[in-house]
Image: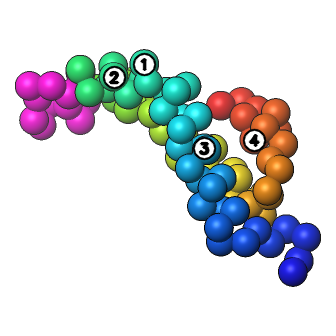
Amino acid sequence: MAEQEVPKRAEEGLFYRLKQKAFEECRAQGTAYADCCRGRTLSMAWKCRDEMAATRKLEELKQRWVAAGKPAEPEWDALLKDL
């Protein structure tokens, strides 16, 4: 097994942990976006742009983790830099 290769079970565990951490860290941003969207249809596309931008940090973190080779022990400081 290559050094950067993570077994599927470990990868699923890491995704679970990342998701839980994201829910804890980003709860306020997600709630703000949901509140902004409530009662809107088309206008949410421009009225809630700032709130949506805040929720995209999780996706960028995931992309950085994948680009780093899905390490079992991520270097969080490097992954979270400038987010």
Type of the residue with mark 3: Leu
Residue 50 picture location, percent across and down: 39, 24
* Mark 1 lies on residue: 28
Q: Amino acid at mark 2?
A: Thr
Residue for badge 3: 18
Local secondary structure at mark 1: helix
Q: Is residue 65 left or right of residue 29?
A: right
| Position above or below: 70 against 55 | below
Task: Name the N-terminal-most of marks 1 and 4.
Answer: 1
* Cβ atoms under marks 1 and 2 closer than 8 Å: yes
The residue indicated by pointer 4 is: 79
Q: Secondary structure at mark 2?
A: helix
| Residue 19 is one of the magenta-drawn residues | no
Tell me the distance, in whole angstroms, between the alpha carbons under discs 4 and 2.
Answer: 24 Å
Q: Quadrant of the N terminus?
A: bottom right
Can see residue 63?
A: no
Residue positioned 77% across, 63% down in the render: 69
Q: Nearer the viewer, mark 4 or mark 2?
A: 2
Q: Does residue 4 appear in the picture of this structure?
A: yes
The spot of residue 38 in percent (x, y) is 15, 25
Q: Where are the magenta residues, as a range?
A: 36-46
